[in-house]
Image (tube, grey):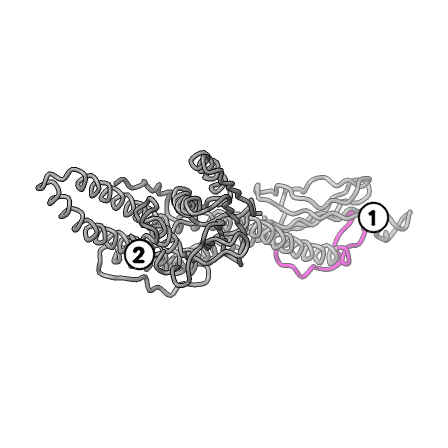
Amino acid sequence: MTAQAIVVRGSITRRLAITVALWVALGLGITGFFVLRMAAEQIEEAADQRMVSLLDAIIAAAVLDPVRGPILARPVSEPEFERPLSGHYWQMTGPGGIVNTSRSLWDQRLPAARPDGPARNEDIIGPRAEPLRLLERHVQLEARFGTPRFQTVTVQVAVTRVPTDEEIKRLRQGLILAFLGLGAALVGAVALLVVWALGPLKRTQEEVAEVRAGTREHVDVTAPAELAPLVNEIEALIEQNRATLDRARTHVGNLAHALKTPIAVLRNALEREDIAAARTQSAMLERLVQHHLRRARAGALAGSAGAEASPLVAAQTLATALRRLFGARGIDIAAKGQQAARVRADSQDLTEMLGNLMENACKWAKSRVEVRVRAARSGSITIEVEDDGPGLAEGQDAAALARGVRLDEAAPGSGLGLAIVVDLAGLYGGTLALERGQRLGGTLARLELPGRVAS
C-alpha cells in the first residue's frame, strides 16, 4: 500500500505575514511620504510667513536718504540683525545701486538685487556657506529730497534654513519610527490572528492523529463556520473508513461461514470418490466465492461519490446479449426510459444486478420482457423488469428473495441470483421488491437505487 506524497509549500502564517508586511510597508510608505510632504510644506510656509513679517517690519522702518540711500529710520525688533553672521540678514538696494545692510552681514553681501526682475523667494547660500531662505520685494519709498518723489528700492531679507531643516528632520525621524512601530504591530497582530484562526486546524490534526493511533474514535473539534465543513468531511471520512472495515470483517466472516458446509461435503464426496457430487460442490464454492467478492467490492465502493452508471445503457447492452442467448425461444426484450438517469453504483455491480433480474425474467417469460428506467423521486432511480410469464403466486415474493431458494426445481440455476441483487442493492442503499406486473401480467421486479437525472 502506497501513500501519495503531500507537497508542503511553506507556512501559511509566514506567507501571510510576509504579504501583510509588504502591503503595510507599501501603504505606510506612501502615507508617510504624503504626510511628511504636507507637514514640511506647512513648516516651510510658517517660516516664510515669519520672514514676511520681518520684511514688512523693515519696509515700515525704511526711509530713502538722498546721500546714504535706503536706511532704517528706527530699529527693528529682531536682535539677530545686530549680531554678526547670526543667520538673519537684511539688505536694501536703492537708486544708483546704493546698498545698505544689517550689521549681521558684517562685510558680506546678499545676492545682487534685480530691480527690473520679478521678486524672489528662493534658497541661497549664506556668508558662512549655510543654507538661507531669501525673500525679496520691490517697494516705492518716498525720497526726503529731490525728484522723483517716490523711487524704487529693493528690500531683501534672508534667514537661515537650519532650524527649519532640523524641524523637518525631526519630524521625518519621528514619522519613520512611528510608522515602523505601527507596521510591526500590524504584522504581529496579523500573525497572531492567523495562528489563532488556525488553532482549530491544529486541534483537528492532533485529534485525527489520535484517531489513527486508536486512542480516539471521533473528531470533536468546535470549528468556526469556515472550517466546519472540512471537519465534518474528515469525520465523515473516518466513519466511512470504519464502516468499510466493518463490512470487510463481516464479508470475511460470512465467507468463512458459507464455505464450511460445502467444503465438508466436498471432502466427503472426494473420500467416496463421488466425482459428480464433488463437481457440484466445487461449482457451489466458486459461486459463493464470486458472490462474496462482488459483495466486498460493492461494499468498498458504496461510499464513493464518484461511482455512477447509466441503468438504461446497461439494460440495453444486456438485452442485446440475452436476445442471442434466448433467441431460440423468440423472446422480445425491450429496454426504455430516461437516458439521463444515473445511479450511484459501480457499473459492474449494476450490470450484475440487472443481469440477474433480466435473465430470471427471460427464463420465465413467454414472449416478452420489458425494462423501464425512470426517476422515482428526488435522489432515487427506479428500474422495473417485467415479464409476461406465469408470475408469482401470492406469498411467494419473500421466498423468491431468500438465498438458495428455487421456486421451480426444474428450472436451471442455484437460487442465488435474486439474493445477490438484494445484497448488492442494500449495500448501495437501495431495495428490491417483487410483485405481479400490471402491464404484462407476469412478475415485476422493482429495483430502486440512489441516483439522479443528469442535466
Q: Nearer the viewer, residue 161 or 80?
A: 161
Q: Where does residue 211 sit, x and y in percent of width and height? A: 26, 58
**Is residue 280 visible to us here?**
yes
Q: Quadrant of residue 194?
A: bottom left
- Residue beneath label 2, please? 243
Farthest-out residue, left: 271
Was residue 169 drawn as part of the magenta stretch in this picture? no
Q: Which residue is mark 1?
A: 66
Residue 455: horizontal and vertical position, in percent?
Answer: 58, 47
Tell whether 178 sits left or right of 424: right
State which region is magenta: 59-80
Give the left or right position of residue 403, taking residue 46 as reference: left
Instruction: Tell me, yes or no, whether the highlighted magenta stretch contains residue 76.
Output: yes
Q: Amino acid at mark 2?
A: Ala
> Does residue 194 appear anywhere in the picture?
no
- Return the residue nearer the eye: 216 or 76: 216
